[in-house]
Image (cartoon, rainbow, N blue to C red):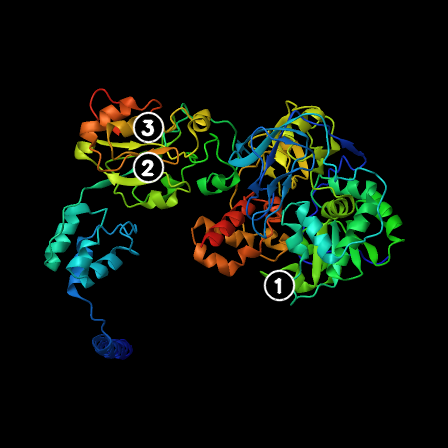
């Protein structure tokens, strides 16, 4: 067997902790109240269309995309709008949210709830993009870039490869893994739909070798679909990073400050591909997603199908409640996710996991001095020198940071993970990026 | 033997003399003409090089003073040296200097550990700038003090320290020169340079939270709730975005004590306002 593909520079091998990879996706059920943020994407917040007292159904449009880089927001439950105002979000900052009290579970009549798989794509590229826009789909891997914008490639660029990202390199998370095992064919059809938008015939579904069930399930389906292939990749973090994955699969490098389209590629997460299938073939707006609830302090780790807006505390209760060992609750994965300020904050389109971590796993070790071992430089998948960036940030030397190419940092956290002096290198890089963007 | 010693002294002596002549000529030829005034002003300045005047340092400020006309000079001020230094500079230049009230930095937050108890434990980097990016801080107030002391690190005069019981920074009136380093360091713009006031008597709103009263009060007992009571005491006080602001034009001696007493939350602080004030 030939050597498996991976990206050439840097990367780490954190412990996987994929404890939920064998647990089938369960329905999380309906909470009493959902909080639906109007900004769950990159770009401008959506314009609110509903008011207090309005009755909504599952799939009702709550807020309309404001401008091109924005996304529609739909109701994930049926019930009554309690209030439309700022509510404390996951970071403690207040965000505009639509609070809905759940009453029954009634769907908009346009939503096709049948479970049979629609294989023929009777739409044109324009119709597909319009449908994706109406469904409010955003990149579900975590960045939240509105999908219609991402798939509309400017005419001066040419995309020849579609990559469906099923890498899921973060420890603990298994949402994409389980989705590939259970909804393999829908994901493949989703890939064919994106192919149709791009006017190309081939797609690569990239899966890490540590997901044998997903590889098996998707490979079985791709036999009957011409042009769609499975590419098994060697496990390495952060392979799920868009630019890392492009290099791993095609050998091309996305130039600094440019987009994947400049390397002739388009990358979509498997979750996004599935959402595209549901939106185009089943008229289903994006109102639910798969969330892994896990962590070493979690009693019953599991994968749930969750309505957007469900408070995280509802899911934590489902999974056995907040155990006394829990020291931190993380939204997202342990490498790139953030510690939650407020566990009543809702699940958004981008929440791939909710992790309950114990003191032992999550506590930051005391800082030491940098010994210039260059381990951070070795593992940086972009080829930056995090120790140098940290030193310049500490000295307030923001002018020189541009020369360090800190804006190319993908915030994967490999540097901080590997640092023997436990320096918070990632925090410094993030600070440098935000300071440079301000200028 | 003696010859060698003599010879080396001679050779070195002649070389030194030749080098001295060359250096003298070169220094005359390439001498940079600098205004005498700049040197004089430079000597008057405090040499703190804090950047409080908006220039790159004391020498830069001296250059700017020497090059300025009367109108331009009026726009220059060294907050560290204050009126005393400015008068001296003015006498060098032959200008007059308009009287300017001395200023001081004030912290526009009263989110002490008692008023705004910590809701979460923050174990990240001990830097306000980084903490501000990660979450809204331990207290839950999105505009309040993060208590990690970026201002203390930034103060070139050692005029700030974090009070261990209240958790928030305290300005040392004797050391603060109102250079503005804390204003620039605070990611939430909580410091304001204000007039020091007669005998140190000044009144200000120690809050920057623009949330609605009920929301702000959830996180901090001393938050401004925009109740408008202070606006009835003096018409210059304005409430915008659910937040009151007391301009310097409001006399602290006359209204300070009343304002601080009227404020139902204690967001208005009056320093040295007599017996009946909050402080």
State the image coordinates of residue A37 (x, y, percent, origin top left).
59, 37
| Chain to which mark 1 belongs | A
- Residue carrying label 3: B228
Q: Nearer the viewer, residue A269 or B48?
A: A269
What whole-number distance in Å separates the C-alpha atoms at marks 1 and 2?
46 Å
Judge the density around disc 2: few (<14), some (14-19), many (≥20) Cα neighbours within 10 Å.
Answer: many
State the image coordinates of residue A107 (x, y, percent, origin top left).
73, 34
Rendered residue at 86%/46% (across/down): A216
What whole-number distance in Å separates the C-alpha atoms at marks 2 and 3?
32 Å
Rendered residue at 61%/58% (across/down): A383
**Badges 2 and 3, same chain:** yes
Q: What's the mark number on residue A422?
A: none
Rendered residue at 31%/28% (across/down): B268
SS class of the residue under badge 3? loop
- Residue carrying label 1: A255
State the image coordinates of residue A11 (x, y, percent, origin top left).
67, 51
Judge the density around disc 3: few (<14), some (14-19), many (≥20) Cα neighbours within 10 Å.
Answer: some
For marks 2 and 3, the one nearer the N-term is 2
Q: Nearer the viewer, residue B242 or B18?
A: B242
Q: What's the mark number on residue B160?
A: 2
What whole-number distance in Å separates the C-alpha atoms at marks 3 and 1?
56 Å
Q: Is residue B129 above or below residue B258?
A: below
State the image coordinates of residue A103 (x, y, percent, origin top left).
68, 25
Marks 1 and 2: which is nearer the front? 1
């Amino acid at each position: 067997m030939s050597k498996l593909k991976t990206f050439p520079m840097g990367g780490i091998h954190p412990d996987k902790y994929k404890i939920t990879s064998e647990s089938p996706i369960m329905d999380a059920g309906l909470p009493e109240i959902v909080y639906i943020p109007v900004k769950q994407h990159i770009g401008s917040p959506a314009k609110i269309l509903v008011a207090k007292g309005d009755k909504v159904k599952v799939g009702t449009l709550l807020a309309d995309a404001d401008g091109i880089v924005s996304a529609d927001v739909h109701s994930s439950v049926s019930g009554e709008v309690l209030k439309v105002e700022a509510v404390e979000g996951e970071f403690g900052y207040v965000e505009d949210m639509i609070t809905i009290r759940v009453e029954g579970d009634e769907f908009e009549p346009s939503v096709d709830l049948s479970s049979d798989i629609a294989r023929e794509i009777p739409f044109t590229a324009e119709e597909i993009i319009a449908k994706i826009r109406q469904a409010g789909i955003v990149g579900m891997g975590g960045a939240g870039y509105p999908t219609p914008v991402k798939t509309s490639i400017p005419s001066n660029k040419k995309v020849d490869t579609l990559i469906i990202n099923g890498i899921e390199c973060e420890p603990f998370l298994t949402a994409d893994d389980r989705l590939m095992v259970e909804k393999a064919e829908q994901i493949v059809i989703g890939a064919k739909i994106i192919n149709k938008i791009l006017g190309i015939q081939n797609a690569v579904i990239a899966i890490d070798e540590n997901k044998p069930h997903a590889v098996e399930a998707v490979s079985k389906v791709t036999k009957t679909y011409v042009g769609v292939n499975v590419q098994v990749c060697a496990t390495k973090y952060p392979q799920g990073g868009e630019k890392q994955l492009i290099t791993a699969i095609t050998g091309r490098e996305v130039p600094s400050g440019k987009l994947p389209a400049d390397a002739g590629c388009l990358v979509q997460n498997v979750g996004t591909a599935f959402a595209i299938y549901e939106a185009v073939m089943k008229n289903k707006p994006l109102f639910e997603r798969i969330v892994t609830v896990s962590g070493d302090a979690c009693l019953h780790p599991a994968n749930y199908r969750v309505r957007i807006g469900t408070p995280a505390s509802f899911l934590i209760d489902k999974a056995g409640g907040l155990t006394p060992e829990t020291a931190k609750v993380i939204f997202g994965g342990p490498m790139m996710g953030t510690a939650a300020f407020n566990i009543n904050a809702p699940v958004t389109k981008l929440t791939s996991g909710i992790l309950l971590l114990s003191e032992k796993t999550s506590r930051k070790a005391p800082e030491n001095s940098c010994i210039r071992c260059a381990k951070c430089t070795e593992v940086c998948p972009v080829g930056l020198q995090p120790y140098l960036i940290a030193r310049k940030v500490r000295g307030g030397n923001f002018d020189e940071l541009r020369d360090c190419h800190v804006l190319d940092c993908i915030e994967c956290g490999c540097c901080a993970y590997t640092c023997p002096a436990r320096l918070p290198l990632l925090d410094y890089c993030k600070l440098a990026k935000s300071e440079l963007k301000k200028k | 033997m003696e010859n060698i010693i003599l010879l080396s002294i001679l050779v070195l002596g002649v070389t030194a003399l030749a080098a001295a002549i060359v250096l003298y000529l070169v220094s005359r030829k390439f001498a940079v003409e600098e205004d005498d005034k700049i040197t004089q002003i430079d000597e008057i300045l405090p040499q703190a090089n804090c950047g409080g005047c908006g220039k790159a340092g004391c020498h830069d400020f001296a250059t700017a003073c020497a090059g300025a006309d009367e109108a331009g000079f009026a726009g220059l001020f060294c907050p560290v040296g204050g009126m005393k230094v400015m008068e001296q500079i003015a006498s060098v230049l032959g200008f007059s200097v308009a009287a300017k009230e001395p200023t001081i930095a004030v912290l526009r937050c009263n989110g002490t550990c008692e008023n705004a108890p910590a809701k979460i434990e923050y174990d990240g980097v001990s830097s306000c700038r980084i903490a501000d990016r990660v979450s809204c801080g331990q207290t839950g107030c999105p505009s309040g003090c993060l208590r990690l002391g970026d201002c203390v690190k930034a103060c070139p005069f050692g005029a700030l320290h974090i009070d261990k019981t209240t958790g928030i920074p305290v300005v040392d009136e004797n050391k603060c020169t109102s250079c503005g380093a804390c204003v620039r360091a605070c990611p939430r713009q909580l410091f304001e340079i204000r007039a020091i006031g007669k005998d140190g008597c000044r009144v200000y709103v120690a809050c920057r939270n623009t949330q609605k009263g009920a929301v702000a009060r959830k996180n901090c007992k001393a938050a401004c709730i925009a109740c408008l009571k202070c606006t009835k005491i003096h018409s210059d006080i304005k409430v915008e975005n659910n937040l009151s602001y007391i301009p310097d034009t409001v006399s602290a001696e006359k209204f300070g004590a009343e304002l601080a007493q009227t404020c139902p939350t204690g967001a208005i602080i009056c320093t040295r306002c007599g017996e009946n004030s909050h402080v």
